[in-house]
Image (cartoon, grey):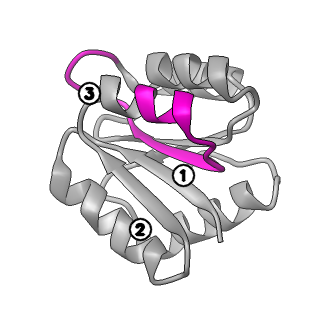
């Protein structure tokens, strides 16, 4: 069982992801607020972060950078409604991070999460 953090400014999106992975036996913590998510990662270990790119205060890359201060090497999947080649390059420059366009294909997301949790390199979707 993995510990997964989901951060999305749209609560329903986070809850949908939570339902998918709780059914697979994972513990999923959903946040809408960047500060709450960052505070959680400072107090609790997580195995994977699924982060929306466009948040209220920070973007997903900034949040990931902060999370990695507490959890170096944390694998992450960045979700975006506005795919962009320059952004994709920035995401991949951070290391083992996947970049997925919304709407999210459930099967592809499950595949990426499984690979991330097994320590495999991730790719753009």
- Distance between the Cα atoms at labels 3 and 2? 21 Å
Whichever of labels 3 and 2 marks the residue nearer the N terminus, that label is 3
Kindly state the secondary structure of the residue where label 2 is placed: loop
Kindly state the secondary structure of the residue where label 3 is placed: loop
Query: How far from the left and from the top, in percent, is residue 4?
Result: 53, 55
Q: Residue at horizontal 29%, vertical 42%?
A: 8
**Viewer-proximal residue, 15 or 54?**
15
Question: Above or below — where is 75 with respect to 29?
Answer: above
Query: How far from the left and from the top, in percent, is residue 44?
Result: 56, 41
Whichever of labels 2 and 1 marks the residue nearer the N terminus, that label is 2
Q: Which range of residues does the magenta coloring cover?
A: 39-58
> Residue 124's image quarter?
top right
Dot in front, 1 or 3: 3
Q: Which residue is mark 1?
A: 125
Quadrant containing the N terminus in the rendered view: bottom right
Q: Which residue is mark 3?
A: 55
**Viewer-proximal residue, 91 or 9?**
9
Whichever of labels 1 and 3 marks the residue nearer the N terminus, that label is 3
Q: Which residue is mark 2?
A: 105
**Viewer-proximal residue, 93 or 23?**
23
Mark 1, residues whose alpha carbon is within 10 Å: few (<14), some, or many (≥20)?
Answer: some
Say whether marks 2 and 1 touch (CB < 8 Å): yes
Question: Above or below — where is 7 with respect to 58?
Answer: below
Query: How far from the left and from the top, in percent, is residue 23?
Result: 45, 83
């Amino acid at each position: 069982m993995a510990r997964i953090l989901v951060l999305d400014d749209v609560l329903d999106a986070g809850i949908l992801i939570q339902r998918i992975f709780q059914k697979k036996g994972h513990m999923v913590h959903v946040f809408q607020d960047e500060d709450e998510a960052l505070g959680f990662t400072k107090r609790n270990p997580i195995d994977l972060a699924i982060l929306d790119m466009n948040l209220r205060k920070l973007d997903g890359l900034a949040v990931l950078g902060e999370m990695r201060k507490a959890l170096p090497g944390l694998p992450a999947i960045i979700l975006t409604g506005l795919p962009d080649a320059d952004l994709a390059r920035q995401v991949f420059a951070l290391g083992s991070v996947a970049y997925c366009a919304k709407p999210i294909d459930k099967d592809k997301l499950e595949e990426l999460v499984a690979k991330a949790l097994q320590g495999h390199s991730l790719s753009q979707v």
